[in-house]
Amino acid sequence: MVLIFFIGFLASLLVSGLLVRRAKAHAGRYGYAKPQRFHVGDTPRLGGVAIFSGCACGWAAAVIAYFCGNLGWMYVDPVLALKWVVVIFPAIAGGVQEDLTQRLAIRYRLLLTAFSALLAVLFVDVSIVRLGLPMLDALVVAAPWLALALAMVAMAGLPHAFNIIDGYNGLAGMVALVVYVALTYVALQVGDRQLATVLLALIGATVGFLFWNYPRGLLFAGDGGAYLWGLTIAVASLVLVKRHAMVSPWFPVLLLAYPVWETFFSIYRKLARGMSPSVADALHFHQLIYRRIVRHVFSDDDSRRILMRNNRTSPYLWGFTMFTVVPAVLFWRNTLVLMVFTMLFVLLYVGCYLAIVRFKVPRWLRK
């Protein structure tokens, strides 16, 4: 399995380096007036292309292992690999189109991620078969179309949730990486080697991209990268829960609580202010940390000062994510415990957000 990781890593690393050198022309179209811009200069936003290249190469190696008769630990059925590529391609294509032109409206990108979700239902047999509560499970059995609709909403929405948290060097990429590792661990625990191999290629591709993204910020994931992370994680989570009854459906809920709750809270916050949820603003949790916690960075070079603040913001959110990832991995079988930790995280998030807004952050957290 190490070979699959290494091939995905190497392919992503090389393609990322090529994009850093050759793909800066389009970056000038990303205007300085955008509220979510926290960098100086024109940086390519085509990291999604590199990540897709890396995972595709990793899957190709796993398919070769399949034909060579290596059915022990590292293999992927060629039909399954092709299905994964077909499923994620529409979402990535829409994201990359937006990264190149800045002109693809959010409704079209949402339609493309929804189309990818539909392909996952048709080709990978993704659906929700249980929700961890007797009443809800009975409803799923009585109305299977409702379970399919919920699965499609999850798969279409999570890519945009990752796009929301993709604001600083290494933030969304590291969150995706730890989630991939957690899913791989549980997949191996239940003996799902093919799914673990699929995820291992994605881990390698993400690490290859992060080499250029953090801390130097030479390449951004863009919408294409965020959509790839969100969609593959959503599909893998639903497949894992459906195939293996011992995996609690609340395992991926807690595992992904940070990007999911960030999205719900952002929608509520914008509606409360009379704004459309599709309008970008600069009041997300990670942006408040950047503005009100990571402040005291001094440098004569303005671009270097912004880069240093950018890089110091992400570790706060990495640590914050551990509040969901660690208990999810420890209690992946126990629905009740996972539900309790999910509720505790929601309370923690809201409490921290209000503390930052009201300038009540402890001095030891500010630097």
Image: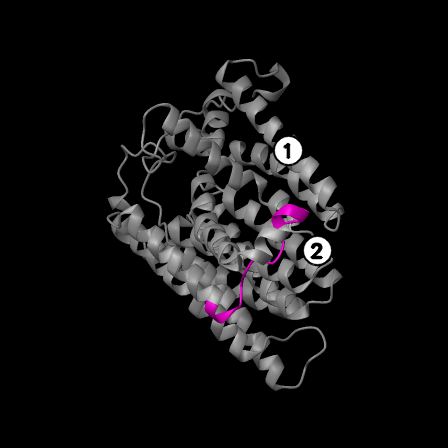
Dot 1 lies on which element? helix
Residue 317 covered by magenta stretch: no
| Residue interval drawn in magenta | 122-136
Please name the amino acid that badge 1 sits on. Answer: Met
Left or right: where does residue 176 sit relative to residue 267?
right
Residue 81 coordinates in the image, percent (x, y): 52, 73
The residue sitting at 64% across, 33% down in the picture is: 343
For the point 43% across and 50% down, which residue is it? 221
**Label 2 neighbour load within 10 Å: few <14, some 14-19, many 20+:** many
* Label 1 – label 2 distance at C-alpha: 19 Å
The quadrant in which residue 175 appears is top right
- Say which residue appears at 24% left-offset and 48% top-offset: 103
Q: Which of marks 1 and 2 is nearer the N terminus?
A: 2
Q: Residue 13 at what x, y percent from top left?
A: 50, 60
Q: Which x, y percent locates residue 170?
A: 51, 43
Residue 337 shown left or right of residue 91 in the figure: right
Tell me which corner region of the image, top left, top right, bottom left or bottom right, holds residue 95. bottom left
> Which mark is on residue 343?
1
Local SS, label 2: loop
Q: From this view, report whether residue 305 is shown above or below residue 161.
A: above
Residue linked to disc 2? 247
Q: Nearer the viewer, residue 197 or 119?
A: 119
Q: Which residue is drawn at 32% across and 25% down?
A: 274
Q: Position of residue 231 (x, y in %)?
A: 48, 56
The quarter of the picture where the N terminus appears is bottom right
